[in-house]
Amino acid sequence: MGGFAESYLGRLREVVGDRLLLMPGARVVVEDVAGRVLLQHRSDFGLWGVPGGAPEVGEDLTAGLLRELLEETGLTADVASPFGFASDPAYETITYPNGDRCQYFVMLYAVRAYSGCAVVNDDESQALEWFATDRLPQMLPNMRRTVEAWVRHKATGAFQMI
């Protein structure tokens, strides 16, 4: 596991600075047997969100997501099922505390079968906790919309475009 500076995005940031980047990404809603979702208390914004990230060079989106899941939570999954896609610039354009800006185009996945124990595994998270979907903590708006889309998908089976 390399740090941000060694990642594709980290190397790209060295060249473009904080200019707006259009970025592919993936997020995962991990659900336990009680129907609770795993959230990470993010160290960048100090708010809760779902695990996820961007693929690295030579990596497909699903493989990148499963790698990020392991790196961020210590959980291993063999299958991640897509349930939606997020691209609304009003929610998916993010300015980070350091001034970096990205507009994300994000495949939304769900994982219900995993192994391992959820533990803070990197410096991107301050904590990991399981939450009922009707009792979510203060979250980044795009992350809350992701969980809400998961709830709608479970109720309807419809692919969610948010």
Image (cartoon, helix red, strand yellow):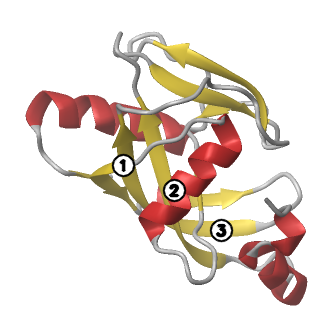
Q: Position of residue 71 (x, y in %)?
A: 69, 47
Label 2–label 1 contact, CB within 8 A: yes
Residue closer to the observer: 148 or 108: 108
The residue located at (53%, 25%) in the rendering is: 38
Amino acid type assigned to the residue bearing label 1 in the image: Ala
**Residue 137 in view (yes/no):** no
Query: Furthest residue to the bottom?
Result: 15
The N terminus lies in quadrant: bottom right
The residue under label 2 is 65
Q: Which of the pair 37/135 is nearer the observer?
A: 37
Helix, strand or loop status at disc 3: strand
**Foreground label between 3 and 2:** 2
Q: Earlier in the sequence, mark 3 or mark 1?
A: 1
* Residue 60 locus on image (x, y percent): 46, 74
What residue is shown at x 80% (from left), y 66% (from top)? 100
Give me the C-alpha separation between circle 2 and circle 1.
Answer: 8 Å
Q: Secondary structure at mark 2?
A: helix
User: x%, y% of residue 78?
Assistant: 40, 48
Amino acid marked by disc 3 = Cys
The type of residue carrying mark 2 is Leu
Mark 3 to mark 1 CA distance (whole Å): 24 Å
Say which residue label 1 marks. Answer: 80
Residue with the mark numbered 3:
102
Based on the displayed image, in which of its 4 quarters is residue 59 positioned?
A: bottom right
Taking the spot 62% from the left edge, 82% from the top edge, the residue there is 57
19 sits to left or right of 161: right
> Label 1: how many residues lie within 10 Å, few (<14), some (14-19) or many (20+)?
many
